Amino acid sequence: MAVHAELTAITIDCADPRALAEFYRKVTGWEIGQADDDFVQLGRGPVGLTFQRVAGYRGPGWPDAAKHAHLDFTVADPEVAVKELLSAGATKPQFQPGEGEWTVLADPEGHLFCIASA
């Protein structure tokens, strides 16, 4: 049996929703929509990202077997994209699995995401 639910957003818990939404605005080029001090919506497509404040939020470790999810992005030039994302506040963990097929980065609050060639 399938419910046939439509995915509308991926919500990311964080300490500073506005700052994190601004970082991902730079990553995606999507526009910021609804926003208040505790919640920010990014993107107006069929699926968007939302960011919600969680008191005492602490980002995941890496590598960490307890990691639950991450975002994957494809770009035309991964090397250029990684440089631009690092200058926008991302960090590049030392541990890089995948034998060069993708690059693992962490956003300013420690959420992991990957960059790969389109």
Image (tube, rainbow, N blue to C red):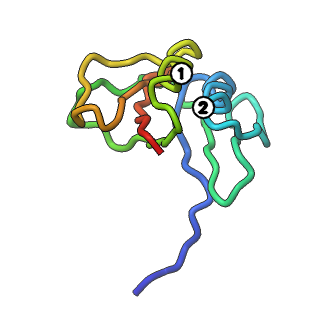
Q: Considering depth in this image, is 15 or 72 the residue closer to the camera?
A: 72
Which percent across, then down, holds residue 88? 59, 16
Which percent across, then down, holds residue 23? 62, 25
Categorize mark 2 by other alpha carbons within 10 Å: few (<14), some (14-19), many (20+). Answer: some
The picture quadrant where one finds residue 38 is top right
Image point 30% across, 38% down: which residue?
101
Marks 2 and 1, how far apart at CA: 7 Å
Disc 2 vs disc 1: Cβ atoms closer than 8 Å?
Answer: yes
The picture quadrant where one finds residue 29 is top right
Residue 67 visible in the picture: yes
Image point 68% across, 26% down: which residue?
22
Which percent across, then down, holds residue 7? 57, 63
Categorize mark 1 by other alpha carbons within 10 Å: few (<14), some (14-19), many (20+). Answer: many
The picture quadrant where one finds residue 69 is top left
Q: Secondary structure at mark 2?
A: helix
Three-letter code for the amino acid on which mark 2 is drawn: Val
Image point 76% across, 39% down: which residue?
31
Which percent across, then down, holds residue 87? 56, 12
Badge 2 or badge 1: first in the primary sequence: 2
Query: Which residue is the site of mark 2?
Result: 27
Three-letter code for the amino acid on which mark 1 is drawn: Leu
- Number of marks present in the image shown: 2
Residue reaching furthest top? 87
Query: Which residue is the site of mark 1?
Result: 85
Q: Considering depth in this image, is 4 or 100 the residue closer to the camera?
A: 100
Q: Secondary structure at mark 1?
A: helix
Q: Considering depth in this image, is 69 or 24 the residue closer to the camera?
A: 24
Residue reaching furthest front? 77
Quadrant the N terminus occupies: bottom left
Tell me if residue 51 comes above or below residue 87 in the rendering.
below
Image point 46% across, 30% down: which residue?
78
